[in-house]
Amino acid sequence: MSRDLVSGAHSVYECVYHIEWCPKYRFNVLRKESSKTDMETILRETAAEHGMRIEELAVMPDHVHIMVRVKPSMSLSKATQLLKGRSLYEFFRKHPNMRLRYRKGHFWAPSSCYLTTGSVDLERTRAYVRNQQDIHQATLANWSS
């Protein structure tokens, strides 16, 4: 993935998240090629409609992995809500027989896995934050003399 920093009016940002979720009871409902293709298409269309950009997408038989770029004004939970909610609605429209298995309309499990992605590893970020005092004090001392 390339480093695409986006400039706003008063900010520069890169908000990319790895989100994973699965169907209720972890059934292998996305094993058919038609179901998998439809789910990929639905997720890509939903992301585009809401200003998100999918970097990577993998629809597995019993779960979905998505790496998505969002605006900082959109929370991670809102992005997940939009992706899961719209994909459920559209998937049930294309595959009405799924309503027999999920009678109450609860296709996705309520839980999700969220991971942030970044251009710098965790240890380097920790060291940077830990050493801020030393860096800024040295700079100020050099400037005042």
Image (spheres, helix red, strand yellow):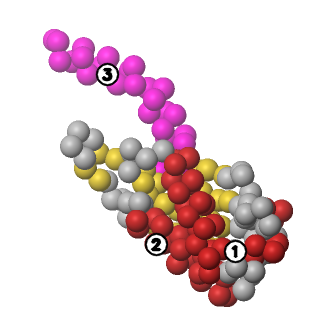
Q: What crowding class fits label 2: few (fewer than 14 Cα within 10 Å), some (14-19), or many (20 or more)?
A: some
The earlier-in-sequence mark between 2 and 3 is 2
Please identify the residue farthest to the bottom as the structure is shown. 33
Where does label 2 land, which residue? 45
Magenta-drawn stretch contains 117: yes
Which quadrant of the figure contains the C terminus? top left
75 on left or right of 14: right
Q: CA distance from mark 2 to mark 1?
A: 18 Å
For label 1, the crowd category at 10 Å Cα-Cα, with few meaning under 14, some 14 to 19 and many 20 or more, is some
Which residue is rendered at x = 17% and y = 18% of the image? 143
Q: Quadrant for residue 101, please give it.
A: bottom right
Q: Is residue 31 above or below residue 82?
A: below
Q: Which residue range is magenta in the image?
A: 116-145
Left or right of 84, for residue 44 = left
Q: Secondary structure at mark 1?
A: loop
- Residue, x 25% and y 50% (percent of image)? 7
**Residue carrying label 3:** 136
* Residue located beneath label 1 in the image: 60
Q: Secondary structure at mark 2?
A: helix
Label 2 is placed on what type of residue? Glu
Disc 1 residue type?
Answer: Met
Question: Disc 2 and disc 3: Cα gap in Å?
Answer: 46 Å
Residues at marks 3 and 1, CA–CA distance in whole angstroms: 48 Å
Q: Is residue 130 magenta?
A: yes
Counting residues from the start of the chain, the first of labels 2 and 1 encountered is: 2
Side of 77 where 13 appears, left or right: left
